[in-house]
């Protein structure tokens, strides 16, 4: 029995202001589907983050629909779970899609009652689907399924944390074997790519302990964007393309997994090229001005130690897809001593910098940008805005 594991498509992602849906479509057409046609897996597994935004736009949903249609044509049954970037808009047609061999899990139905998969070679496997869910949803679902057992469990606790919920859910399972878990979360010892850190609510407490996963025969995960094998039975397929410049040095792809008589026969990382071309270049401004034309999405690190006038616009001629520009050495210390630094105007000593409040910063900023003193009306508006902002933040919004 052979399966392909993919994850973290992030369809509709905007990369530094550029929409990359076209590159994503090319990836599926030229790389992903040719591989599926060649491998002809018995099953495809997608472990979350199909789209980048919980409210995807029309083009993104249309692309997703085209991908599902192609899978349907290839007659590849597909198990999908939602990730933290997805929302129930992605699983909207799940009741209809299950008639076409697509299972999209957005709750815990297929976690409490695993899917029984029987391959054409009569290989029988149990799939436990555990999509990304908020602590609130996990609690509701645990309560409605386990009722009194759950009530007894939480009655002994003053406060209930996410790890308590997860511990409860996993330790109350009686696994049917061979058991395969599909999930969307970070585990201990997993390698982060840095892209995941910007997602909502991912803190240390959400790291899954490996001990909770030890009874599964195979664990296929999404969320971490690096293609990796955590241990002999835990795998991340990572994102389909590098979604940051830092990630562009790593190979991207899918896992091909072969199972025979309930045992892992083969696990192979198949790399797939990314149509999203990213380049990081380092050099002095002068060197880069004579660099040949570069069409990739580019990040430039300037080696210059003094500020260059309008470098972004001037380098655009050679790098039409220049997205990020930064200096190798922070210019902060040298620019602080120049007259242009607004936060030091008004004879502030450097040691006082930390004590500046928003109001002083704003007065100095206004003076530098507008070339005159701020009038009381504008200053009061600013103060009002800041206090509103602080109130809201303290209110937990
Ligand atoms: Mn992701």
Image (cartoon, grey):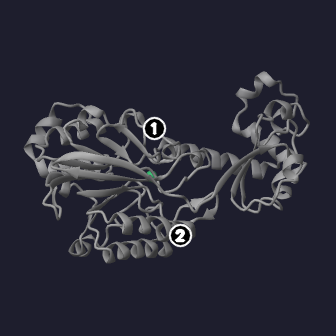
**Mark 1 highlights which residue?**
191
Distance Cα–Cα, label 2 vs label 1: 28 Å
Outermost residue toward the left? 148
Q: Secondary structure at mark 1?
A: loop
Tag count: 2
Which one is in front, 350 or 375?
Answer: 350
Residue 191 vs 352, above or below: the answer is below
Residue 384: % across, % down: 65, 48
Q: Residue at x 19, y 42 (%)?
A: 169
The first of marks 2 and 1 along the sequence is: 2
Q: Residue at x 58, y 47 (%)?
A: 389
Q: Is residue 86 rendered to the left or right of residue 346? A: left
Residue 71: % across, % down: 34, 72
Residue 205: % across, % down: 37, 34
**Mark 2 highlights which residue?**
26
Which one is in front, 203 or 393?
Answer: 203
Q: Secondary structure at mark 2?
A: helix
Residue 51: % across, % down: 44, 62
Q: Residue at x 39, y 32 (%)?
A: 189
Q: Is residue 167 rendered to the left or right of residue 293? A: left
Q: Is residue 334 rendered to the left or right of residue 77? A: right
Residue 373 visible, this angle: no
Q: Residue at x 44, y 46 (%)?
A: 227
Q: Give the image quarter of residue 292.
A: bottom right
Outermost residue toward the top? 351
Which one is in front, 220 or 3?
Answer: 3
Count neighbours of disc 1 (C-alpha within 10 A) and say few if under 14, some if 14 to 19, many if 20 or more: some
Looking at the rendered image, the disc whose residue lies closer to the viewer, 2 or 1, is: 2
Residue contact between numbered discs 2 and 1, judged by CB atoms under 8 Å: no
Q: Is residue 40 rendered to the left or right of residue 362? A: left
**Quadrant of the frame with the N terminus:** bottom left
């Amino acid at each position: 029995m052979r399966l392909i594991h993919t994850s973290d498509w992030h369809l509709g992602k905007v990369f530094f202001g550029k929409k990359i849906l076209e590159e994503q479509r090319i990836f599926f057409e030229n790389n992903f589907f040719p591989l599926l046609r060649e491998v002809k897996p018995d099953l495809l597994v997608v472990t979350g983050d199909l789209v980048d935004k919980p409210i995807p736009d029309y083009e993104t949903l249309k692309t997703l629909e085209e991908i599902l249609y192609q899978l349907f044509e290839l007659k590849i049954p597909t198990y999908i779970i939602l990730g933290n970037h997805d929302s129930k808009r992605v699983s909207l047609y799940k009741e209809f899609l299950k008639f076409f061999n697509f299972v999209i899990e957005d709750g815990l139905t297929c976690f409490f009652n695993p899917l029984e998969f029987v391959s054409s070679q009569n290989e029988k496997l149990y799939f436990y689907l555990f999509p990304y869910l908020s602590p609130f949803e996990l609690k509701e679902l645990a309560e409605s399924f386990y009722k009194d057992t759950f009530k007894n469990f939480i009655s002994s606790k003053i406060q209930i944390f996410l790890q308590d919920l997860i511990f409860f859910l996993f330790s109350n399972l009686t696994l049917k074997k061979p058991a395969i878990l599909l999930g969307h979360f970070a585990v201990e010892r997993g390698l982060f790519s840095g892209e995941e850190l910007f997602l909502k609510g991912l803190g240390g407490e959400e790291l899954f302990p490996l001990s909770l996963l030890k009874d599964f025969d195979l664990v296929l995960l999404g969320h971490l964007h690096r293609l990796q094998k955590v241990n002999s039975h835990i795998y991340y397929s990572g994102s389909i393309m590098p979604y940051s410049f830092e990630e562009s040095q790593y190979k991207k792809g899918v896992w091909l997994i072969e199972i025979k008589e309930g045992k892992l026969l083969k696990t192979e990382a198949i790399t797939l090229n990314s149509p999203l071309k990213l380049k990081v270049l380092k050099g002095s401004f002068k060197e880069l001005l004579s660099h040949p034309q570069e069409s990739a999405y580019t990040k430039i690190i300037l080696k210059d130690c003094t500020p260059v006038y309008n470098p972004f616009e001037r380098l655009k001629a050679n790098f039409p897809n220049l997205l990020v520009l930064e200096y190798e050495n922070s210019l902060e210390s040298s620019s602080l001593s120049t007259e242009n630094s607004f936060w030091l105007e008004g004879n502030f000593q450097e040691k006082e910098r930390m004590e500046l409040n928003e109001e002083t910063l704003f007065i100095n900023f206004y003076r530098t940008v507008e070339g005159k003193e701020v009038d009381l009306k504008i200053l009061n508006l600013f103060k009002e805005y800041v206090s509103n902002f602080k109130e809201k933040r303290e209110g937990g919004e």
